[in-house]
Image (cartoon, rainbow, N blue to C red):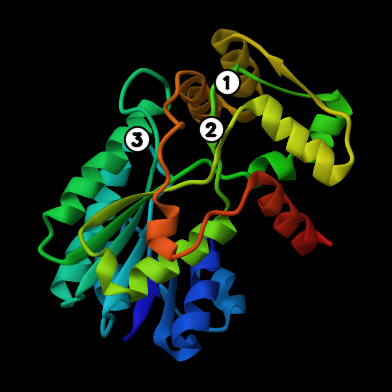
Amino acid sequence: MKIAVTSASGKLGASIVKHLIHIIGKDNVVAIARTPEKASYLGVEVRQGDYNNRAQFITALKGIDAVLLVSGMDAPDQRIIQHRNVIEAAKQNGVKKIVYTSIVGAEKGNAFSPIVQTNRQTEKDISSSGLKWVIGRNGIYIEPDLEYLDTYIKDGQVSNCAANGKCTYTSREELGFAYAKMLTEDKHNRKIYNLVGDAITQSQLVDCMNQVYHTNLVYTSVSVAAYAKERTAALGDFMGTIIAGIYEGIKKGANDVASDFETATGRSHKSAIEMMNVFKNEQE
């Protein structure tokens, strides 16, 4: 069985490749990347594939039994077309199974909702493709908060607009493990899984960070408007608006969902502190 992973030069794709190697061996894993040299360190065959180029994917998916489609990062209207390029290339090549990394979130009501809507459209495209399929809805990654730790320490706080909303954090490491299972086990076919951990508030997240990193951070809640203004100033209109939308969604409960992680993997999801310790050990 030969399995291809798209966007393999990204952190999620690389984690999935790593976990697949453990299960089926490196000779049965193909990494697909827009810039192949960026994925060469993974130690598997690398093929070129740009989501905007269906012809490249028709070539890249030759001889592949199952493909993992990592959700694209482009503007909402472009993402649906990009994903369809991969789905159609898979069908043309006789790929038997497609697994998609979708996302948890509100389909309306905040600035992140257009991204969620495009993911739901791709879910529909995949489930009606005629291929075997599995869909994972990823929770919010915990790693960006940990990568941002130096800034938090400098500010003495974590500040956003999530208020007391609960978020079911996950990690790219946990997701890599889950998707490798979903790709290689037939019992998951035609299932949609929420791939998330335990629901925690921002204050609880900060408490965990203080425990693992021996910091003295506090959580400060600000208005949605103030946070959107600060994030767009720091990150630009597109990313800043999306980040603000994510935290507004958390505030309104969009990320407080039941977890299917144990059904998908056979084990419970790591806690926030466990995920932080894994990340910390990898950095040392």
Q: In this rendering, is residue 136 above or below 152?
A: below
The foreground one among 69 and 219 is 219
Q: Which residue position is annotated with label 3?
A: 116
The spot of residue 161 in percent (x, y) is: 59, 17
Q: Earlier in the sequence, mark 3 or mark 2?
A: 3
Residue drawn at the location 41% of the way across and 87% of the way down = 28
The C terminus sits in image quarter = bottom right
Residue 238 percent across, percent down from the top left = 49, 29
Instruction: Classify mark 3: residues with Cα within 10 Å, few (<14), some (14-19) or many (20+).
Output: some
Q: Quadrant of residue 152?
A: top right
Q: Which residue is mark 1?
A: 162
Q: Position of residue 144 (x, y in %)?
A: 65, 43
Image-based side of 235 in relation to 77, left or right: right
Q: Mark 3 to mark 2: distance in Å?
A: 16 Å
Amino acid type, callout 2:
Cys
| Classed neighbour count for the residue bearing mark 2: other residues with Cα under 10 Å, few (<14), some (14–19), many (≥20) | many
Alpha carbon separation for disc pair 1 and 2: 9 Å
Question: Badge 1, how many Cα within 10 Å: few under 14, some, many 20+?
Answer: many
Mark 1 vs mark 2: in front: 2
Q: Residue at x 44, y 57 (%)?
A: 262
For badge 3, the amino acid type reads Val
Asked where in the image residue 86 lies, by quadrant, the reply is bottom left
> Are dots 1 and 2 in contact, CB under 8 Å?
yes
Q: Which residue is mark 2?
A: 167
**Element type at mark 3:** helix
Task: Report the amino acid beneath label 1.
Answer: Ala
Q: Is residue 204 above or below residue 5?
A: above
Question: What residue is shown at x 76% (from left), y 32% (from top)?
Answer: 207
Q: Secondary structure at mark 2?
A: strand
Residue 13 visible, this orientation = no
Disc 3/disc 1 C-alpha distance (Å): 18 Å
Q: Residue 223 placed where, x, y %?
A: 60, 9
